Image (spheres, helix red, strand yellow):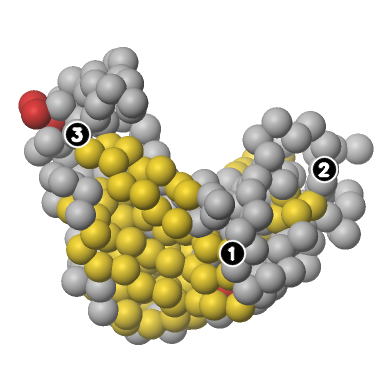
Amino acid sequence: MKSLVLLVLFLSVTTIHAQNWPSFRGPNASGVAEGTNPPTTWDVEKSQNVLWKTNIPGLSHSSPIIWDNQVFVITAVSSDPKSTYNPKDRGIDLSTDETKHTWMIFALDKRNGRVLWTDKPYEGVPRAKRHVKATQANSTPVTDGRYVVALFGSEGLACYDLKGKLQWKQDLGVLNPGLWDDKESSWGHASSPIIYRDLVIVQADGHQQSFIAAFNLKDGKQAWRVERNEITSWTTPTIYEGKNRVELIANGGRYIRGYDPLTGKELGASRITTPK
């Protein structure tokens, strides 16, 4: 039987109108939903504190995001019915994904789980391998209420309006982070895109490339790109709005760096422990 991602929304009646959750870890990447009182226990089989559940085909470690009454989630569906992941693997094993995959995005009704629209922006054999504990859809989408942007790893970026119309796609090349000192390993991309003003920003630290880049939300054209002398990482950048300036903070394997989010100019760096 083909594996399924089970998306379950745990909401009580009092939290159905909770705030938007537009990106990885929510507003400002804080991981905090203000003013909510969600249940702390639930039982899927008994439908205790479960408003609805919707089966999504394929494998995905992407988190869902929410804007108004829409929930967005991505997945990768393998043509191999035995495709799976092993969360208990303790090694550096690679999965053999040498079969056709279909990458999909779903928009669901937050109130009842009904599929509002779906699209298949990419199909083909994955351009990069993954760890057996990972999937081919690890990055969380992002939205600003006008557009929703999803990063499908080495397959590329795809941008939609909230009604499901594809606006543009952008090829980012092969994104292949793995064990930092083993260039043959490729564990799958997982850093999520973020939105700042009219830009979507992507961090990609890997064996064949390490860069951070911004693309125009309207048309997908690259606004700026900065090469990074970094080892592999899977961190998602974040925006810090200070008193004197706004900084794009990007954590890497060697440095934590600050950039101007509008131009990509590096503003400063702090060295962290480097593997020996």
Could you tell me the amino acid type at mark 1? Ser
Residue at label 3?
Answer: 51
**On screen, 164 above or below 168?**
above
Residue at label 1?
Answer: 78
**On screen, 44 above or below 259?**
above
Please tell me how crowded label 2 is: few (under 14), some (14-19), or many (20+) other residues with Cα within 10 Å: some
The residue positioned 32% from the left and 21% from the top of the image is: 43
- Whether residue 52 is visible to the viewer of this picture, yes or no, is yes
**Mark 2 and 3 residues: CB-CB less than 8 Å, in contact?**
no
Q: Tell me residue 150's x, y (percent).
A: 42, 64
**On screen, 206 above or below 89?**
below
On the picture, is 155 further left or further right than 223?
A: right
Q: Tell me residue 77's x, y (percent).
A: 53, 63
Between the residue at mark 2 and the residue at mark 1, the CA separation in whole angstroms equals 21 Å
Can you tell which mark lies on residue 130? none
On the picture, is 114 further left or further right than 157?
A: left
Between the residue at mark 3 and the residue at mark 1, the CA separation in whole angstroms equals 29 Å
The image quarter in which residue 125 lies: bottom right
Say which element carries label 3.
Answer: loop
Which circle's residue, 3 or 1, is located before the other in the chain? 3
The image quarter in which residue 255 lies: top right
